[in-house]
Image: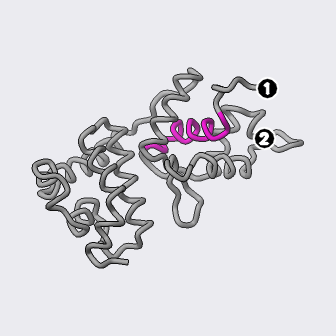
Amino acid sequence: MPPADAPTLGDYVLLALLNLGGDAAMVDIEDLAAEAFRLAPQRFRWRKYDYPSLETVRLALKNANTRTVSMVLSTPEGHERMLTAQGAQRARTVAAQLGSMSESRDDEALRRRTNAELARVEAHPAYARWRAHGWSELDAVDLADMVRCPVSTPRGAFLSRVQRMEAEAARWQRVELKEFLTEAAERLPRLLADAGVR
C-alpha cells in the first residue's frame, strides 16, 4: 500500500499536463494519456496490455477537480485540458516531490504572446482603477474588455477565459495580476448579475 503522502493518480495527471505545457495552453487528452503512461506506466495502463488508458486519465481528471478547487480546465468538447493556477502550483509541488519534471519547454514565441497579453491587461484603465479603489469601480463590461471576451459570452466560457489568464499570470509570476484574476473569477457571477446578464 502506498504511503499517505504518495502522489495520487490526479497528481500524476497534473504533472503530465505541466510537462506538456498545460500551464500555458490546452493539451489534447490523448497526448496527456501518453505522458501520464510515461510517468507511471503501471498506474495508467490497460489491465492486460501496455497501452495508455484514456479512461484512467479521464477519471483522474474528474477527481482532480473538487467542489471547492478547480485544478483543470477543459474545452466544451472535452478533448483538451489546461491547468488552472492552483493546478499548476500542485503539479510543481508533485514535480519537486518526485524529482521527475521534464525541462521547461518554453517556446520564445509563446512567451512573447502570453506576456504581451498579460501586459495588455495590466495596462488597461480598469486594472488601474482596481489597483487604486478595488472592485468598487469595476463592472462586467470592464472585465470582459480586459480579457477580450464579450460580456454576453456564456458564463462558463467567460469564467474559463478568466481562469486561463489567471493560470498564465501565475506561470509568469505576475503576482498582483494573478490576485486580480483570482478575485475576478470569484466575483464574476455577481458582476454578470449586476449587469443583467444571465
Q: Is residue 61 inside the magenta stretch?
A: no
Disc number for residue 45: 2
Q: Find residue 10 and report its image quarter.
A: top right
Callout 1, which amino acid?
A: Met
Q: Which of 112 and 179 is in front in this view?
A: 179
Residue 61 image position (x, y, % from top left):
62, 49
Residue 166 image position (x, y, % from top left):
35, 48
Kind of element beneath mark 1: loop
Residue depicted at 36% across the width and 66% down the height: 189
Callout 2, which amino acid?
A: Arg
Residue depicted at 74% across the width and 44% down the height: 52
From this view, report whether residue 129 is shown above or below residue 83: below
Residue 102 image position (x, y, % from top left):
53, 28
- The residue tagged 1 is 1
Disc number for residue 175: none
Q: Is residue 16 inside the magenta stretch?
A: yes
Q: Distance from label 1 to label 2 (Cα)?
A: 19 Å
Residue depicted at 56% across the width and 20% down the height: 99
Near mark 1 (Cα within 10 A), the count class, few <14, some 14-19 or many ≥20, is few
Residues drawn in magenta? 8-23
Tell me: 57 left or right of 144.
right
Mark 1 or mark 2, which is nearer to you?
Answer: 1
